[in-house]
Amino acid sequence: MRLVSMLCLLAIFTAACGSGSSAKPAAKSSYPAVVDLRDKATGSYPEVKVASKDNDFVPAAIRINPGTTVSWHNEGRSPHDIKPADAKQDFGGEKFGVSPDKFKPGDEYEYRFDAPGVYRYYCALHGSATKGMIGEIIVGDVDASGSSASPSGGTTGAVGTKGGTLRVPGDYPTIQKAVDAAQAGSMVLVSPGIYKEAVTITTPNLVIRGLSRAGTVLDGGFKFDNGIKVLADGVAIENMTARNYQRNGFFWTGVKGYRGSYLTAIRNGDYGIYAFDATYGQFDHDYGAGSPDAGFYIGQCFPCHAVITDSLSEWNGIGYSGTNAGGDLIVMRSVWRNNRVGIVPNSGTEEKNPPQHGATIVGNTVYSNNNAKTAAISIAQLAVGNGILLAGGNDNVVDRNLVYDHDLVGIAAIPLPEKIINPDDPKAMNFDARRNRIVGNDAHDNRAADLGLVTSIDKPTDAGGNCFSGNTFTSSLPVNLEQLAPCGAPASPAFKTDLVKFVGLLTATKPPSADYREVALPKPPALPDMPDAAHAPARSADEQVPMKVDIAAVQLPKG
């Protein structure tokens, strides 16, 4: 097999392991900078293109001439819809918008804008009229600053009138009705029961708490998209279960301040517990199982100021995925087992802030991530059999983790060469693995190698500033890795990436994905309830998030 072919396999293997999305509106006082496409649309039938990624429209805001057709292309992995932000706004006398069943991955939708004006829209699956996955079309030379639509960022939606504790179903029959009635800073306390609804939160600093983790259940019935979608800052969700949703169990997007504690997410069609473009967050004492992508995901943030701790992820395509996420980001003291692949921070140009850098993975137990029976996105299928992979990541620390029983590699830093994957994409980049520290880990019984390093597709003799020291291990790729790339000393001139052997491990046929709705998941282990859920004071996520962590005190798990 030619080297280029093997590199392509490596490229496919290390492609973005999380939500594929591009630059989204930042939390500012106006929509993002407008991209003027008037000179891009010429001829008798002028047309411009907008890509729909998994959390963004790209470009998010454009200006066009009257009579131009906008063509949306779904380039993500998820279905989307397109809805006008103002339902009363005239989009030219013909109904504007498309439903998710007609805008699946690979689908296109077109609409011609004839009248000058400002037209704002959104995807209801991944945002609201004013926040999240939003877009703007400015037709002609009109001034967009005076539009009645609210700008991106900040608090969105109406704020209710009821303070204190709102009880479901005692005071309100559904969680959504209680959320809509609640003032900022209130708590919605939910009794045990099965709630067949999808909840959207646009009021800041709410606490949504179940009285029983296993007994307070949101059930999507494979009809609703998200169990709870949070579009407001400072929202904490506690002590409940979300299952059987087409997309995500618990989903925060575009917020500052979030917390998910004592949550259970089972059998959801994308992610279990998910934070995107969000900062100052914490996931603790949570459980994620049965998602084709990741049980836990934190992506597109730097610095993230986030912690995942004391949690369990199993029977997912990926245990933890973190595209372009780092900077005060700690994944710690959790168990990642029986997924197809364990922990995967990765770089990618389809989200902001590349390359991924600055995450700390410490004190975790990562084992038996060889599970071919799970649902899995394509990357999870190809990556099956690996423990911790730093895919094109820089400046990460992997310290004091117990990693064992993998068919391929226990802990590895590898490149992500996007230019080979997408040679026609001018934005594609090759991401090398740089300056990662793998220290103090116990990696054993990983059949291909306990430790691995492939730094670059262009410089096979460059260790890239990556270093390995103080690990307990038996085998490595290349052999004698700690002597060739030690921490605290220059890399050996003899260092050479064993790229051919490493990529050769990935060429075997990999098991296909199963339907996430039909996978026979194991019964969840005994999971703790939130202590004193009925009486504990409400604590939103507007302060003391994330928790303070003494990294030096985290211990290597025994095993």
Image: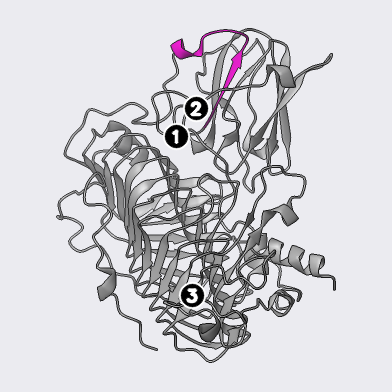
Residue 227 point in image, percent of width and height: 44, 48
Q: Quadrant of the N terminus?
A: bottom right
* Magenta segment: 134-147
Residue with the mark numbered 3 = 467
Q: Is residue 214 visible?
A: no
Question: Of the residues shown, which amino acid type is indicated by label 2?
Answer: Pro
Question: Of the residues shown, which amino acid type is indicated by label 1?
Answer: Ala
| Disc 2 to disc 1, C-alpha distance | 7 Å
Q: Is residue 419 magenta?
A: no
Please state if 427 lies on the left or on the right of 182 as rendered.
Answer: right
Residue 384 point in image, percent of width and height: 63, 73
| Disc 3 to disc 1, C-alpha distance | 35 Å
Residue 290 point in image, percent of width and height: 53, 64
Quarter of the image holding residue 533?
bottom left
Residue positioned 25% across, 75% down in the render: 553
Residue with the mark numbered 2 = 32
User: For this rendering, which residue is in front, 337 or 239?
Assistant: 337
* Mark sitting earlier along the chain (3/1): 1
